[in-house]
Amino acid sequence: MGREWEAVAASCAKEGRDYGDFLLGLTERELIEREQRAAERRIKGAKFPVLKTIDSFDFAAQPTINELLMRQLLSGEYLEARENILLIGNSGTGKTHLATALGFAACTQGRKVRFWSATALVTHMLELREQQDLKRFLTQIEKHELLVLDELGYVPFSKDGAELLFEVVSRAYERLSLIVTTNLPFEQWTEVMGSERLTGALLDRVTHRVHIIEANGESYRLKDARKRHKKPRKG
Ligand code: ADP
Ligand code: MG
């Protein structure tokens, strides 16, 4: 307000508007700026590996993805209902990009978001448990409104690791939304979680109220690399 009041006052004076208008104009600017700063803080706090938004996603390059559903989800209603989103597909099909775009949208909608690689999360929790510090972490997790678990399935978990992941999922259940990205069809989740019982319980919670986005196309990375390769070199 300190920075802006003179400009707002000058424009009000010029347009013959009264003090009420001036005050309203000034407080509106203050609120907008506060909201922007809060969104920036939330985006920083979410710790996205690389910031990607839906604007840079080329749906035409990945026609198997349900664009309509994706666009609906970006509006954030699923967060209100504490529903989950599962992004399934091969490597390089844009799952992490889309998960980040959803997380980014949630941040701008005032939600508290945290992005985790599934493996990093489990490793982190195993370390915290050694330090007797896990409880606090799990309580903090519950304060989020959206948790992204990226790349479940590339590395199998130890027995303890799988149990800790289950702990996160069961705490999240009906309290906050989860976005999970994976290259694994459901039948193969047991290979990652180790135990069939645990996998069943985990899948039960993740898929209870879930929107599924499948990406079955070719890897964007591969296609991109091939395109660059084909381009005739200059000089
Ligand atoms: P996945 O997580 O499915 O392995 P990523 O989301 O990491 O794939 O995508 C790999 C790279 O390709 C990223 O840099 C991503 O931004 C880009 N990418 C993938 N699909 C698309 C797309 N349809 N449009 C634009 N960029 C894409
Ligand atoms: Mg990925």
Image: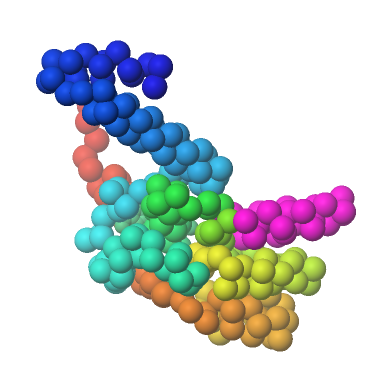
Q: Image check: 29 left or right of 160?
A: left
How is colour applied across the structure in the image? rainbow
Residue 142 covered by magenta stretch: yes
Find residue 123 and report its image quarter: bottom right
Residue 152 covered by magenta stretch: no
Q: Nearer the viewer, residue 34 or 15?
A: 15
Residue 103 on image: x %, y %:
45, 54
Q: Image check: 17 left or right of 89?
A: left
Residue 94 on image: x %, y %:
39, 59
Q: What is the span of residues highlighted in magenta in the rendered image?
A: 115-143
Residue 107 on image: x %, y %:
45, 49
Q: Nearer the viewer, residue 181 or 108?
A: 108
Instruction: Say which residue appears at 33% left-offset and 19% top-offset.
Output: 4
Q: Quadrant of the N terminus?
A: top left
Instruction: Say which residue appears at 54% left-offset and 47% top-offset.
Output: 46
Residue 87 higher or lower than 185, as above or below: above
Q: Is residue 183 visible?
A: no
Find residue 164 and report its image quarter: bottom right
Q: Image check: 187 left or right of 95?
A: right
Residue 52 higher or lower than 14, as above or below: below
Instruction: Say which residue appears at 56% left-offset and 52% top-offset.
Output: 114
Q: Is residue 185 visible?
A: yes
**Quadrant holding ligand 1?**
bottom left
Number of marks drawn: 0
Instruction: Say which residue appears at 42% left-offset and 68% top-offset.
Output: 78
Q: Quadrant of the C terminus?
A: top left
Q: Main secondary structure of the magenta part?
A: helix
Residue 25 on image: x %, y %:
27, 29
Residue 220 higher or lower than 157, as above or below: above
Q: Image check: 125 left or right of 217?
A: right
